[in-house]
Image (cartoon, helix red, strand yellow):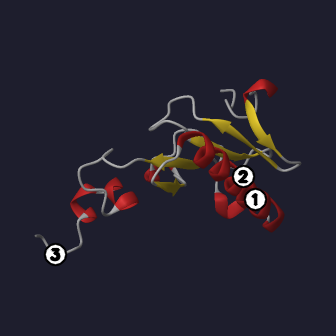
Amino acid sequence: MTCPFCTLPRERLVFESELAFVIRDGYPVSPGHMLVIPRRHVASFFDTTSEEQASLLRLLNLARIEIAQQFRPAGFNVGINDGAAAGQTVAHLHIHLIPRYEGDRDDPRGGVRWVLPEKAAYWPRD
């Protein structure tokens, strides 16, 4: 099967470096949702080089600035699904930068912990 991130047309790229690039998510969770992706086909963040990691983080920051200016979110979730058990559906590392907006969820506490809903609410109940 062909990797969708290895065959992207250049016009999809929002930002790029020698080692990584940024695209708008094709199935956005919220307005402005972007993905930061290494150029090298590698499935796990933990298999990237320190140079790739630095490039990914630089582009993550550029994407955050772009989203903040364009959409004015109230916050962000940054996430990586690393491995099938973690929900990874494309075996090419991609970092989600998901803008969050006031009122997009009744109670946003717990953030990324909601991947396992029964474990998300760890704070005392009101």
Residue type at numbered disc 1: Arg
* Mark 3 residue crowding within 10 angstroms, few (<14) / some (14–19) / many (20+): few
Residue type at numbered disc 3: Pro
Residue 58 is labelled as 1
Residue at 22% in and 74% down: 123
Residue 62 is labelled as 2
Mark sitting earlier along the chain (2/3): 2
Residue 5 in the image, given as x and y percentages of width and height: 70, 34
| CB under 8 Å between discs 2 and 3 | no
* Mark 2 residue crowding within 10 angstroms, few (<14) / some (14–19) / many (20+): some
Q: Is residue 94 above or below residue 2?
A: below
Residue at 45% in and 38% down: 30
Q: Is residue 91 visible?
A: no
Which quadrant does the N terminus fall into?
A: top right
User: Within the image, what quadrant is residue 16 found in?
Assistant: top right
Q: CA distance from mark 2 to mark 3?
A: 37 Å
Circle 3 is placed at which residue position? 124
Residue 67 in the image, given as x and y percentages of width and height: 60, 44
| CB under 8 Å between discs 1 and 2 | yes
* Mark 1 residue crowding within 10 angstroms, few (<14) / some (14–19) / many (20+): some
Please tell me whether mark 3 sits on a helix, a strand or a loop: loop
Q: Nearer the viewer, residue 96 or 84?
A: 96
Q: Nearer the viewer, residue 37 or 67?
A: 67
Residue 38 in the image, given as x and y percentages of width and height: 75, 48
Q: Nearer the viewer, residue 83 or 27?
A: 27
Residue at 77% in and 41% down: 15
Please tell me whether mark 1 sits on a helix, a strand or a loop: helix
